[in-house]
Amino acid sequence: MKKSLIIAILVISGFIPAICKESEQWEHIAPNNYVFKDGIMGLENIYGYSFLLKSYNKGQYEPINGKQVHYTLGQYELNCAKRTYKIGVLDSYDEDDGFINGDYNKYAQFQPIVEGTAIYVMATKLCKISI
C-alpha cells in the first residue's frame, strides 16, 4: 500500500510542473481566448506581428467528421500600419487534444480588425495603437 501511494505521488508530482509550464505559456486575452506568449514574432516584410491564438469552442464550431471541436489553434498575422489581420492556418482539436482537421489558407486576405474581438485585444497590445 505504501509503495503504491509513493509511486502515485511521484507520478502526479511529475505531471504538475508540465501542466504549470504549459499554462504559463498561454496568456488569457479575452473570454475563451489565449495567446501563446513565447510564439509572438515580429514580421520582417511589414510592420506587424504573427502569433498563435487558442480559441475554445463557445458553441460556434460545428462537429467535423463527427467529432466535436473543443478548441481551434490559429496562426494570425497583424498588419499594424493598415490595422488589418489574416488567418493563415486554423487547426481544430478535440477534448483530448487530438487533431481533427487543419485548414491552411494560402490565399487569405487581410481584413479589418473588429473591435471587441481577441484580435482587437492583440492589435492594441502589440501595435500600441487604438483601432
Image (cartoon, helix red, strand yellow):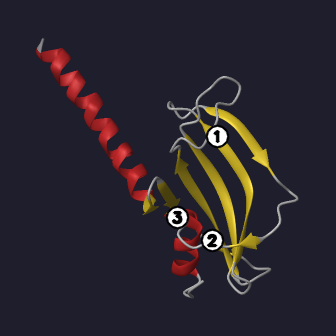
Is 10 in front, or is 23?
23
Residue 99 is situated, as x and y percent measured from the top left of the image, at: 64, 34
- Label 2: how many Cα within 10 Å (few below 14, some 14–19, many 20+): some
What residue do we see at 46% from left, 62% from top? 30
Q: Which residue is mark 1?
A: 92
Q: Earlier in the sequence, mark 1 or mark 3?
A: 3
Q: Which residue is mark 2?
A: 114
Q: Look at the picture and state if 22 lies above or below 117.
A: above
Q: Is residue 1 left or right of residue 75?
A: left
Residue 118 is situated, as x and y percent measured from the top left of the image, at: 54, 65
Q: Look at the picture and state if 93 lies above or below 81.
A: above
What residue do we see at 67% from left, 44% from top? 91
Q: Nearer the viewer, mark 2 or mark 3?
A: 2
Image quarter of the C terminus: bottom right
Residue 41 is situated, as x and y percent measured from the top left of the image, at: 63, 71
Cβ atoms under marks 1 and 2 closer than 8 Å: no
Which SS class for mark 2?
loop
Is 109 in front, or is 4?
109
